[in-house]
Amino acid sequence: MSTESITHKKLTISAVDATPMDGKTDGRLYTDYNDDHVINIGKGGGFAANFDNASIIGSGAGVPDAAAVFNMFGVPDDFSDDQKSPAEFIGQVTFTLGTAVAGPGQRFFDSIAITDEHHPLTIGFEDVGNNRICRIVLDDIGYGKLIFEPITFTGLSDISFIVREFGKK
């Protein structure tokens, strides 16, 4: 397998959702996701269809050890023009800031933990706990979108995620 980076996609989130997607509450069904929390990947995101892995890094405005919890979902490309694909739960992810500076008032995430994981393949965590830039690496299994649904922010704001796809099938 050869590897190469295609493009980076950035998403910034500043507030927590009042009601997370639960699949049964009107307006919070798995097809009711908020596009403000979506990064398009795969064919729909301008990436080549033959890349099969996603690497996710993040930063936030806050002090070291501040944390944010997100539900992460993957969405396959839409079934058709008139039927939106449902969001598939990948897991609940906790990101914690470290000391590495990402920009004025911003620090990179230094640690990542995932609970309630439901991705069919291995999710990897790289460079965790050393105050550099940690990342999540996962097989995108044909997702056209990744959704980062904010659950809680503790001591930080303005979370940014950068996603890149790599690896040839």
Image (cartoon, rainbow, N blue to C red):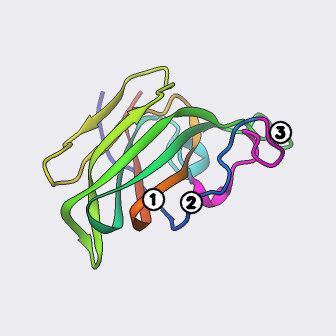
Instruction: Give the number of the disc on residue 153.
Output: 1
Secondary structure category for the residue under label 2: loop
Q: Amino acid at mark 1?
A: Phe
Q: Nearer the viewer, mark 2 or mark 3?
A: 2
Labelled pair 2, 3 in contact (Cβ < 8 Å):
no
Quadrant housing the C terminus: top left
Q: Is residue 24 above or below residue 47?
A: above
**Where's residue 18, x and y in %?**
66, 57
Q: Earlier in the sequence, mark 2 or mark 3?
A: 2
Q: Is residue 2 visible?
A: yes
Secondary structure category for the residue under label 3: loop
Instruction: Kindly indicate the quadrant of the structure image that contains residue 109.
Output: bottom left
From the viewer's perspective, is 128 left or right of 26?
A: left
**Where's residue 163, x and y in %?**
42, 51
**Which residue corresponds to the image point at 49% horizontal and 25% vertical from the top-left?**
119
Instruction: Kindly indicate the quadrant of the structure image that contains residue 136.
Output: top left
Instruction: Give the number of the disc on residue 16.
Output: 2
**Which residue corresponds to the image point at 86% horizontal and 43% vertical from the top-left?**
82
Q: Is residue 7 visible?
A: no
Instruction: Kindly indicate the quadrant of the structure image that contains residue 73.
Output: top right
Secondary structure category for the residue under label 1: strand
Q: Earlier in the sequence, mark 1 or mark 3?
A: 3
Magenta-tinted stretch: 24-38
